[in-house]
Image (cartoon, rainbow, N blue to C red):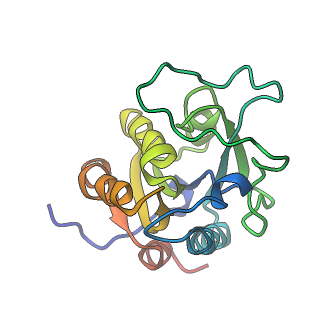
């Protein structure tokens, strides 16, 4: 199917930024470094705010006592670094700014156990733009849930990264094109009307 011109309606669109927080952007990622991902996400956020697009900043972290953290029995445990103070703080410069909504999640996806779906539906949002770290964990989990809830999606490839380039490439090649549209930062900004 050939798409007509790629356009986004600011009143029906939200930008959802996944886990661009101190403890996550400090880890090595690929194929785009964390600094570039944050810079592009900031460009997206500013462009969206200027056009009246609802901006949602998602961050992850357990409760202070850590008792609500998931502890599945797995064959291949992921890294569990000690969480330093400020680990879950959204990176400076990105926000939150006036009008933004902040979602704190306790697991990979941003929908389960949060008010994200409620906030989007109350604003009649039908399309979400997704970016952040990690492409194949937080972004993908949120995307799969959004797909099942009927949202249209745009995945910003150069504003995402994963622990390794192969994991990033896999999800952008095999998953995201089947549940939404894959674009770059400049394409998304151009798809929004001029402020």
Which of the 4 quarters of the picture holds residue 45? bottom right
Residue 71 position, x and y percent, is 58, 22
Which of the 4 quarters of the picture holds residue 166? bottom left
For residue 39, side relative to residue 189 (left or right) = right
Q: Residue at x 75, y 26 (%)?
A: 66
Q: Is 101 placed above or below 6 here? A: above
Q: Is 112 placed above or below 181 here? A: above
Of the 4 image quadrants, the one containing the N terminus is bottom left
Q: Residue at x 41, y 33 (%)?
A: 149
For residue 34, side relative to residue 150 (left or right) = right
Q: Residue at x 48, y 62 (%)?
A: 160
Residue 137 position, x and y percent, is 47, 44
Please name whichever residue, 4 or 26, is drawn nearer the observer in this view of the structure: 26
Please name whichever residue, 11 or 134, is drawn nearer the observer in this view of the structure: 134
**Tally of numbered tags:** 0
Residue 54 position, x and y percent, is 63, 55
Of the 4 image quadrants, the one containing the C terminus is bottom right
């Amino acid at each position: 199917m050939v798409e007509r011109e790629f356009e986004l309606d600011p009143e029906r669109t939200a930008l959802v930024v996944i886990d661009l927080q101190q403890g996550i952007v400090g880890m090595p990622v690929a194929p785009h470094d964390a600094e570039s991902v944050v810079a592009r996400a900031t460009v997206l956020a500013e462009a969206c705010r200027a056009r009246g697009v609802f901006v949602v900043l998602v961050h992850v972290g357990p409760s202070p006592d850590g008792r609500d953290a998931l502890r599945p029995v797995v064959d291949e445990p992921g890294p569990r670094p000690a969480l330093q103070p400020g680990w879950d703080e959204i990176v400076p410069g990105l926000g939150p700014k006036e009008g933004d909504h902040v979602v704190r999640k306790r697991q990979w996806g941003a929908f389960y156990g949060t008010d994200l779906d409620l906030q989007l539906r109350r604003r009649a949002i039908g399309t979400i733009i997704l970016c952040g770290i990690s492409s194949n964990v937080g972004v993908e989990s949120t995307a799969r849930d959004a797909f099942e809830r009927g949202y249209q999606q745009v995945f910003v490839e150069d504003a995402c990264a994963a622990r390794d380039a192969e994991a990033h490439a896999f999800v952008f090649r095999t998953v995201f094109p089947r549940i939404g549209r894959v674009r770059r930062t400049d394409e998304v900004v151009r798809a929004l009307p001029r402020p």
